[in-house]
Image (cartoon, rainbow, N blue to C red):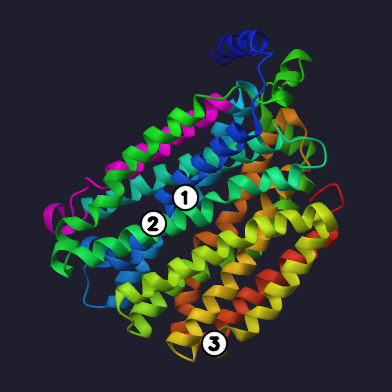
Amino acid sequence: MTDAISKVSSTSASSKSAQVNSPARVLTASVVGTTIEFFDFYVYATAAVLVFPALFFPTSDPNAALLASFATFSIAFFARPLGAIVFGHFGDRVGRKTTLVAALLTMGISTVVIGMVPTYSSIGVLAPLLLALCRFGQGFGLGGEWGGAVLLATENAPEGKRSWYGMFPQLGAPLGLFLSSGTFWIILHTMDQEQLLTWGWRIPFLASIILVGVGLWVRLSITETPEFKKAIEKHERVEVPIAELFRNYKRSIVLGTFVALATFVLFYIGTAWLLAYNTKTLKLPLLDALAIQIAGSIAFGIFIPLIGKLAERFGRREMLILTTVLIGLFSFSLPVLLGMGESGVLIFILVAMALMGMTYGLIGTALAAPFPTQVRYTGASITFNLAGIFGASLAPYIATSLQASYGLAYVGYYLGAAAIITLICILASGRNEV
């Protein structure tokens, strides 16, 4: 089956060899797709704090309900490496474009179905099980999306512009965060708590079908990347990319996984965990908590293109080292800033998301760098999503547990430890490995 599809892909690529994707079309396709995927992903993260504990995990202990909600949140991160393997195989065998369309559909369908799942009061324990299954589908789809979007940008990049082009798909994360937080902010402005819990929370999930339609239209308008076309023409594709990857690139997988560790820990402390801290511990109104998160998403988005330009001038590895050191230093300020109340929280989120923009803007190109074209989709996707397991899947859960048992200082120590591990792995990587 794969061979038959590969032959069709090869013929198609040859017939379109004269076609060249314009930079505007490539960058639009990469950022629109990741924006939609991350919107879907973050809508769940926001709902996991605001409504899912009450609707799917009713219990007399609010903290236990929140932890149960965060547990289903983490499922997606364990699904992402599986998605990376499956979609990565077809991305390296069949092509980037076709695989990206399939990943977008997988993510979109899973998100829309979440908006239709009955709650615990209707079907009992089956409700959280269905929610967990849909969350798995979200993770599976995103596992195939991210790597392909980065390659769509970087494999179309002119010489010397890979860091700049690789920055564009990363903009999908702050844009998705802004849209998801903004959507819930608007919903809370227009309905009361009862309406939100009865039907309002379903709106962002169901509305995702419109965004998916836009994403498909954009993705279908592009042609295959030049580098993948060359791999077809030179017969460089391998039969089983994942086997080739673990046979010859184990070092790059391990180092890449932990190079991205601090990126994930920082982000999910600054979003899912902080939203829970603001609403459950500081007792901030939901609208104020979401407004703070929206402000953070803006800082996040501003610093991604800024670091892309700095990396072109001073070097991607050097900027990654600098950013990781700054994250480590910043971790000591966490208990101080969050102990200052709402004003300290705002300062914290702005600085945290600025640093997040700096590390995230570089990580896509860095994780793709060590791998040749024939295994690059699989390699970049696997390392990114393994980092998601170690750095993101349990970050809100661990931070919530540390805060409850030991205090805010230990949440800072957790972030600092992640920065130290990341710094060690960056230094252990060669100049061409990040």
Give the dominant element type of the magenta stretch: helix, strand or loop. Answer: helix
Magenta span of residues: 97-125
Q: In the rendered view, does 157 fall on the left or right side of 126? A: right
Q: Residue at x 44, y 28 (%)?
A: 217
> What residue is shown with label 3?
337
- Residue 296 image offset from top left, x and y in percent: 50, 68
> What residue is shown with label 2?
180
Q: Is residue 150 above or below residue 277?
A: above
Give the residue type that dot 2 points to.
Ser
Q: Residue at x 39, y 64 (%)?
A: 70
Give the residue type that dot 1 points to.
Phe
Q: Residue at x 24, y 67 (%)?
A: 189
Viewer-closest of 2 and 357: 357
Q: Which quarter of the figure has residue 243?
A: top right
- Residue 9 image offset from top left, x and y in percent: 60, 14
Viewer-closest of 182 and 325: 182
Viewer-closest of 350 and 139: 350
Q: Going from the N terminus, do you reach mark 1 or mark 2 first?
A: 1
In 3D space, how far apart are the residues under numbered discs 3 and 1 (Cα atoms)? 28 Å
Q: Going from the N terminus, do you reach mark 3 or mark 2 first?
A: 2
Q: Residue at x 63, y 79 (%)?
A: 331
Give the number of callouts.
3
Q: Which quarter of the figure has residue 392?
A: bottom right
Task: Inspect the magenta stretch and tell me whether residue 314 lies in it.
Answer: no
Instruction: Residue 57: tell me if it is visible.
Output: no
> What residue is shown with label 1?
38
- Residue 246 image offset from top left, x and y in percent: 72, 38
In 3D space, how far apart are the residues under numbered discs 3 and 2 (Cα atoms)? 25 Å
Contact check, label 1 and label 2, Cβ < 8 Å: yes
Task: Inspect the magenta stretch and tell me whether residue 122 lies in it.
Answer: yes
